[in-house]
Image (tube, helix red, strand yellow):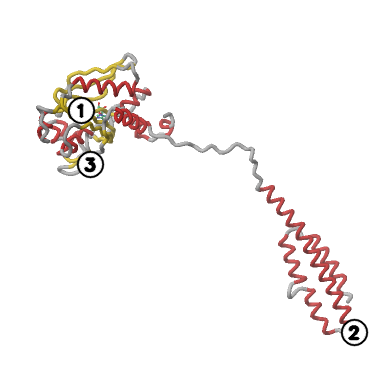
Amino acid sequence: MDEIKPMLDAALVEVGNASTVSDLDQLEIGYLGRKGEISQLLRSIGKLPMEERPRYGSLINEAKERLAAEIERRRNVLKAAEHLSRLETERLDVTLPGKPVSRGRLHPLTQTAERIIEVLSGLGFEFVDGPELEDYEHNFKALNYPDDHPAMDEQMSFYIDDTHLLRTQTTALQGRVMAKRKPPFRIATIGRCFRYEAVDATHHHTFHQVDVFMVDEGVSMADLKGTLATFARAMFGDEVTVRFRPDFFPFVEPGVDYAIRWHDRWLELGGAGLIHPNILESFDIDSEKYTGFAFGLGIERIPMIQYGINDLRYFLDNDLRFLRQF
Ligand code: FA5
């Protein structure tokens, strides 16, 4: 019986000194667990004389309850302290400014393409896509190129095999449309073109064109000029005027190149003309009844003019310092 009191006192001190909940769990097992000190004392009860057993038993039980209560009290204190310190380390200052979410933006050429689509759709043109991997037939032959035209020289084109090449111009769509549709139609297309050229500030092996054409009764150069002027003003502003100069493309007659006057300068945009009667006839379109115009231009030219970009290679470099400006 003399053992009980000192053991309890020592246990109470240890419990009071326990500094974490898990230390306390270890103490609880050590004293109150199945093989703990108190349990062992209880088991030794059988060795005592009969008359001493009740008093001994109740002393141990008292000690057990006292210790259990103390452990419980200390556990609550430690738990509260641990909770508080977690709150402290995980504290969130809701008044801090948030992390900025960086916003993506469209590539300047995509922005230009979207504007072109908006303007030409407004003028009644339907957008149709053509393949980037074209056949010789559509890229050249159907467009009235004589067999010995220098543009068909391998120097200018990326051939994939004897009859396929990466399209050099979006004009290649014309034959695809005329094979399927009867006039009247107004079609536009926009996309990548490829040419086997030395890359410099104004030429790339990969660039973009828009091509626009319509076929109907009575379509004239005046319609072409009016459409081009409307298009150019929508892209560059109302003060813009358009100039035609004679030029040659196998698929137009007459053919022109055109420039716009913008801030007192003439800027070349692309080529245009009336669709060659040979082409209409080759698709069984009566060229006595129907005429058409066509124009095409490189779309890199547009943001280059608008923003004063002096090198077209920036568009393909993917340098964020450049792209973030648009
Ligand atoms: C053509 O490609 C004709 N298909 C345009 C056309 C359409 C004429 C309909 C008549 C009727 P050209 O080769 O000039 O024409 O190219 C047109 C425009 O594409 C050029 O003015 C230029 O802006 C752009 N371009 C051509 N080659 C490159 C290149 N390597 N890099 C960047 N832009 C180019």
Can you give x and y, in whole percent of width and height, for residue 30 in the image?
75, 70
Task: Label 2: state its secondary structure.
Answer: helix
- Which residue in the protein does label 3 denote? 133
Judge whether residue 317 can be spotted in this image. Answer: yes
* Vertical side of 28 occupied by 303: above or below: above
Placement of the N terminus among the 4 image quadrants: bottom right
Dot 1 corresponds to which residue?
294
**Mark seen at residue 51:** 2
Query: Which numbered mark, 1 or 2, is in the foreground of this view?
Result: 1
Q: Quadrant of residue 127?
A: top left
Q: Tell which circle, 3 or 2, labels the residue nearer the N-terminal end.
A: 2
Left or right: 250, with 263 as reference point:
left
Residue placed most toward the observer, 115 or 18: 115
Mark 3: amino acid: Leu
User: Across the whole image, how many numbered discs are drawn on residues?
Assistant: 3
Give the SS element for disc 3: strand
The x and y percentages for residue 282 are: 10, 35
Q: Report the residue that reaches farthest toward the bottom.
A: 50
Q: Residue 283 lies in what quarter of the image?
A: top left
Q: Earlier in the sequence, mark 3 or mark 1?
A: 3
